[in-house]
Image (tube, rainbow, N blue to C red):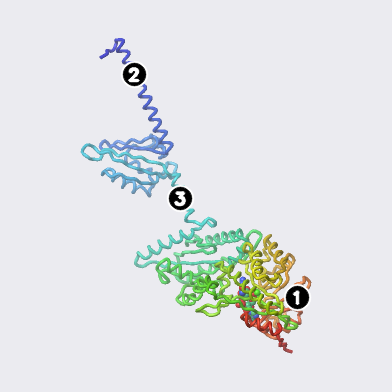
């Protein structure tokens, strides 16, 4: 063994010192690494010696707590001061478990001295003594605030509608599920109301003015609802133009009904959407827990039925669910469902109603009108199912089917040498704004090798008010092909006639409501006269719709209206009947009263 003082001894001492220095250096590097490592991964650690009641906390731990070591009382219990009040119990339980030898893994919140809330994830491990008793608790804690906030943001997104920020359908479903569950678990639950709110004719706005305007409208409606109902209701955007609302706080059915009517009156004010000022109306269907249903499905279903009823009665109204409603709606439900297979099951028919010269009774054209021969409900009129077809998009295949039928019939009339009249076909906005609208029509007529000139397309003026590039281009193309353009239901929709100058309209069909009152009021007559003057200046042919009496006929003729259509001349009829009528000379004997 080398001794101190000797050369060899000195040498050895130096070596030992160098080694020690090296070790200390290594230790410091390691310590620093742990410190930085903890900082980077936002980790902290602590060790509690149970027997000695000694607490050690790493620098990372202080970082997470947002305070300096000297600011913290180093005791086990003092820690709870830093924990979010709502989470203290949870942490205490875990500590108790740890002292009893059970490890834990949990998340909770810390509140920094500045009041900032931090989420942490903590894992505790137990070190046991030789007798198997817990001796030390070691805790690793990580600041997971960023991750938590991201999760919360994602969760918010998952549960909310992007456009309005309202709870979405998924969140609504969760909410109503929980509400039903809770209510059923108590003996005398409070009633709550489920309200289904749907915009009347929203599809029309969307199709007419585009989705941007539609979206603006939805946003403004949502703001009005939130403003009116505030915190008293759970308002969600259930789907496109449908809002589902849960109302928990009302004193009586009457109170609830007042609130529902208040919602309707939110729509008394017009909506300012960019350049447009639009009116909107809604219908509301309401069901009440527990009378109208105890499960979310029943409640939603019944609110839906009430809504359907409200719409069917003309919209702009509130309907509370009742058993009668479900009976009335049975028909509507089955129609909606059955419609989708009506073509395939060969249930659709085309009826034809002549358009005649008011002077001579000669058949100038014929309007093709769709009918539905339903196995249970009989012949259903388009008034009942066109809007269902528009809503479901079925109007597109239906329209193509109808045009094919028309072409088939028209070809057979030509083959039999019948008079070359024109045929009018109705197109609603959903059909008109379909991509390739013109190409599709052209292709179908081509299938039958017909000349395009026989066709008249009837659209409503609302389509023309949207003077988009596509509308202008499509109408130009139609007319270049030789297809005529008729404006249907003229006078009922918009008072603006600006489109008359922009498009080269061939035919105006004056709505039946004018004709019906033509013999009674002065005002109507003035309007009709000016329509007739304007039409003759613009070289537009006029057709008076809905002529039912000889008096109306005479009157319209006197006003120089060119053509007419109505029950007086002929009701819409099956193809066979119409063909027979055509083959008898193509003219309807006029019964003009004196
Ligand atoms: P519309 O285009 O205004 O068609 C005229 C409607 O008035 C027809 O009702 C016709 O039967 C009815 N009508 C004819 N003469 C008289 C009369 O003298 N008095 C009265 N009170 N009514 C008369 P319909 O066939 O029930 O059609 C209703 C609506 O359904 C049509 O109104 C049209 O907008 C739509 N429609 C019918 N077929 C089609 C179709 O194939 N496609 C599209 N998109 N819509 C259609
Ligand atoms: Ca029509
Ligand atoms: Ca019409």
Residue holding disc 3: 152
- Cα separation, mark 2 vs mark 1, equals 116 Å
Residue tagged 2: 17
Cα–Cα span, label 3 and label 1: 65 Å
Q: Nearer the viewer, residue 480 or 468?
A: 480
Q: Position of residue 204 (x, y in %)?
A: 61, 66
Residue 410, image x, y percentages: 66, 75
Few, some or many residues within 10 Å of mark 1 (<14, 14–19, 20+): many
> What residue is drawn where x is 38% and y is 63%?
181
Mark number displayed over residue 532: 1
Residue 31 visible to an observer of this rendering: yes
Which one is earlier in the sequence, the residue at label 2 or at label 1? Answer: 2
| Residue 407 location, quadrant | bottom right
Q: Is mark 1 within 8 Å of ligand 3?
A: no
Quadrant into which the N terminus falls: top left
User: Can residue 513 be seen by looking at this rendering?
Assistant: no
Q: Residues within 10 Å of mark 3 (few under 14, many from 20)?
A: few
């Amino acid at each position: 063994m080398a001794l101190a003082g000797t050369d060899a001894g000195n040498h050895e001492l130096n070596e030992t010192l160098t080694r020690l220095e090296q070790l200390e250096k290594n230790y410091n590097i390691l310590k620093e690494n742990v410190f930085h490592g903890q900082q980077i991964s936002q980790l902290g650690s602590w060790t509690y010696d149970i027997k000695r009641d000694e607490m050690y906390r790493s620098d990372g731990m202080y970082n997470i707590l947002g305070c300096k070591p000297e600011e913290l009382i180093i005791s086990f219990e003092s820690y709870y001061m830093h924990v979010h009040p709502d989470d203290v119990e949870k942490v205490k339980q875990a500590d108790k478990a740890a002292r009893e030898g059970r490890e834990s893994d949990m998340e909770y919140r810390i509140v920094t001295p500045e009041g900032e809330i931090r989420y942490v994830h903590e894992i505790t491990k137990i070190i046991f003594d030789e007798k198997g008793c817990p001796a030390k608790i070691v805790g690793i804690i990580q600041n997971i605030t960023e991750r938590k906030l991201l999760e919360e943001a994602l969760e918010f997104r998952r549960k909310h509608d992007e456009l309005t920020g309202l709870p979405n359908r998924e969140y609504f479903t969760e909410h109503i599920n929980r509400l039903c569950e809770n209510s059923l678990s108590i003996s005398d639950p409070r009633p709550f109301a489920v309200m289904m709110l749907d915009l009347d004719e929203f599809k029309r706005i969307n199709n007419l003015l585009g989705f941007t305007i539609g979206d603006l409208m939805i946003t403004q409606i949502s703001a009005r609802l939130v403003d009116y109902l505030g915190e008293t209701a759970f308002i969600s955007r259930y789907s496109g133009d449908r809002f589902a609302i849960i109302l928990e706080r009302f004193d009586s059915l009457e109170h609830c009904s007042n609130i529902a009517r208040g919602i309707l009156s939110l729509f008394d004010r017009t909506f300012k959407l960019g350049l447009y000022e639009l009116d909107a109306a809604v219908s509301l269907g309401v069901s009440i827990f527990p009378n109208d249903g105890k499960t979310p499905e029943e409640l939603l279903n019944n609110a839906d039925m009430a809504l359907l009823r409200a719409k069917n009665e003309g919209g702009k109204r509130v309907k509370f669910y009742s058993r009668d409603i479900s009976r009335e709606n049975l028909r509507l439900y089955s129609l909606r469902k059955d419609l989708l297979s009506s073509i395939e099951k060969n249930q659709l028919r085309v009826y034809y109603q002549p358009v005649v010269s008011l002077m001579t009774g000669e058949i100038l054209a014929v309007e093709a009108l769709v009918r539905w021969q339903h196995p249970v409900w009989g012949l259903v009129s388009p008034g009942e199912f066109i809007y269902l077809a528009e809503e479901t998009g079925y109007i597109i295949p239906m329209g193509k089917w109808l045009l094919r039928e028309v072409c088939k019939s028209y070809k057979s009339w030509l083959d039999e040498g019948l008079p070359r009249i024109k045929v009018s076909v109705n197109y609603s906005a959903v059909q008109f704004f379909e991509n390739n609208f013109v190409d599709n029509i052209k292709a179908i007529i081509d299938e039958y090798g017909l000349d395009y000139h026989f066709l008249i397309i009837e659209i409503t003026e609302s389509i023309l008010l949207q003077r988009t590039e596509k509308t202008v281009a499509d109408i130009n193309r139609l007319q270049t092909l030789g297809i005529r353009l008729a404006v249907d239901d003229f006078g009922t929709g918009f008072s603006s006639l600006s489109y008359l100058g922009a498009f080269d309209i061939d035919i105006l069909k004056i709505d039946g409501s004018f004709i019906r009152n033509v013999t009674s009021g002065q005002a109507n007559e003035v309007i009709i006269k000016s329509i007739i003057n304007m039409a003759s200046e613009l070289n537009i042919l006029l057709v008076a719709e809905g002529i039912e009496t000889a008096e109306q006929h005479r009157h319209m003729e006197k006003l120089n209206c060119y053509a007419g259509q109505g029950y007086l001349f002929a009701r819409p009829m099956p193809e066979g009947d119409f063909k027979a009528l055509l083959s008898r000379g193509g003219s309807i004997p006029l019964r003009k009263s004196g």
